[in-house]
Amino acid sequence: MLSIKISLFVVIIIACVVVAAAAGVAVGIVYRKKVAEATIGSAQQEATRIVNDAVSKAESKKKEAILEAKDEIHRQRNELERELRERRSEVQRQERRIAQKEESLDRKTENIERKDEQLNNKIKAADKKAEEIELVKRSQIEMLEKISGFNKEQAKDYLLKTLESDLVHEKAVKIMEYEQKTKDEADEKAREIIATAIQRCAADHSADATVSVVALPNDEMKGRIIGREGRNIRTLETITGVDLIIDDTPEAITVSCFDPVRREIARLTLEKLIADGRIHPTRIEELYEKSKREVEHTIKQTGERATIDAGVNGIHPELIKQLGKLKYRTSYGQNVLNHSLEVSYLAGLMAAELGADVKTAKRAGLLHDIGKALDHEMEGSHIELGVEYARKYKENDNVVHAIEAHHGDVEARTIVACLVQAADAISAARPGARRENLQNYIKRLEKLEEITNSFPCVEKSYAIQAGREVRIMVKPDAVSDDQMVLVARDIVKKIEDELEYPGQIKVNVIRENRVIDVAK
């Protein structure tokens, strides 16, 4: 019973607690609701305030924007009005200018119309006068034909022939005037330059041949040189590459060879053998090698001396060697090395007179015949070989061109090339410098006469003054006095194109009329 009471009491207590809890919850809910309602109300007021502020600010911004827009519109309107005023004034100026031009054009048009009318009147008058002139001309032509006995075509032919003759005369006179003027202007300066160069150049001259003579102490030495069964002379000729001529000439042996270097080596070898007295094949070989070294040393020294004498430096050693070989080369009897030095001196002197490059002129003059040291070893002319060799050893382009042009194979494009040409001609043309054999001399004279006789107007010609002058007799009925100048010019041109000759050739054209009658 007690337990039931206790259980009931506990239930009541729990029920009271639940009711109290339910009442607290209800009270809390009501409180929270009131607090939330109060918060919402304040938030709505704040929102209303913010909206009102935003609206007021928007209204103010709107008013400001409207004011700014009005100001901008006003400003742009003022600018547009100003531009319109300026354009209107410009248009007015253009209109005034156009109006003035129209007035000017109207006046010009009126003037042109008046001139056109005047021109038409003049043309009509000219046509009328031309008709009158034509009538007078026809009448005059008819009268002239009656008086002269020529018709129109005959008179035209006569006038053309007369005009042609006059033109030939005038052309001949002009040619003579221009030639004389050119000669007068150039001769004075050329004579001064060339004479100065020649007078300042005093080079030695030596003439070599294709043989060398070795003196013997006695005629018994000839037999020793020949040796038993010709053994010594065969060995000597085989090693040296020369021909030994042993004839009846007392106490002398002739060494013959076209290669001057080999001939010089053979001469030195022979002299050493004669001085030594021991002549046999082994000794010949020993002395040949010694002589060869001596000649090579001499070639080198000679080349170096030539460069020093000419005042030229920086030449490749191989070119110096070839320069030394020129000591043993001759051209028409003129020593080529001496000739090259002469050309170097003369070219340098003339370059100094003209204000040209003296060093380049001397260098080109010294090397212009360098190919002559090679032409017996390689194919090609001495000019081609010289150009190839100079380019191989990096010589200046002006020097290479001067080598290439010194005989006129190519046209001279530089003053140095022209100076080398002139110096080469001066060195070769001076008296005693060169000589040529009889056969070449005769061929040159025959070729000269053949060239002059090839002209149909030439009756006969004679080469005189050792080929320095040619006298030409022309047919008097084929060539007039005025045409002789043109004929001489044509002959000179053909000689220059087809004939090679030292110096210059004077062409003397002669026209002669002879009248022969017999008194009976």
Image (spheres, rainbow, N blue to C red):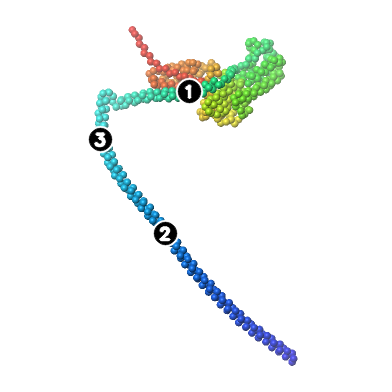
Q: Nearer the viewer, residue 149 or 130?
A: 130
Q: Quadrant of residue 358?
A: top right
Amino acid under label 1? Glu
Labels 2 and 3: the sequence-earlier one: 2
Instruction: Give the labeled residue for mark 2.
Output: 78
What is the spatial separation of the Cα atoms under label 3 and label 1, in whole angstroms?
64 Å
User: Contact (CB < 8 A) between labels 3 and 1?
Assistant: no
Q: Residue at x 65, y 86 (%)?
A: 19
The percent coordinates of residue 429 (x first, y second) are 53, 20
Amino acid under label 3? Lys
The quarter of the rendered structure image containing the N terminus is bottom right
Q: Is residue 64 above or below residue 12?
A: above
The quarter of the rendered structure image containing the C terminus is top left
Amino acid under label 2? Asn
Instruction: Give the crowd class for mark 3: few <14, some 14-19, many >=20 residues within 10 Å.
Output: few
- Toward the right, the furthest residue is 2
Closer to the observer: label 3 or label 1?
A: 1
Instruction: Give the crowd class for mark 1: few <14, some 14-19, many >=20 residues within 10 Å.
Output: few
What is the spatial separation of the Cα atoms under label 2 and label 3, in whole angstroms?
73 Å
Labels 3 and 1: the sequence-earlier one: 3
Q: Is residue 384 left or right of residue 148?
A: right
Q: Is residue 67 left or right of residue 361?
A: left
What is the spatial separation of the Cα atoms under label 2 and label 1, in whole angstroms?
87 Å
Labels 2 and 1: the sequence-earlier one: 2
Q: Residue at x 69, y 15 (%)?
A: 274
Q: Nearer the viewer, residue 470 or 59?
A: 59
Question: Any mark on residue 188, and which?
Answer: 1
Q: Residue at x 29, y 27 (%)?
A: 152
Instruction: Give the labeled residue for mark 3.
Output: 128
Closer to the observer: label 2 or label 1?
A: 2
Closer to the observer: label 2 or label 3?
A: 2
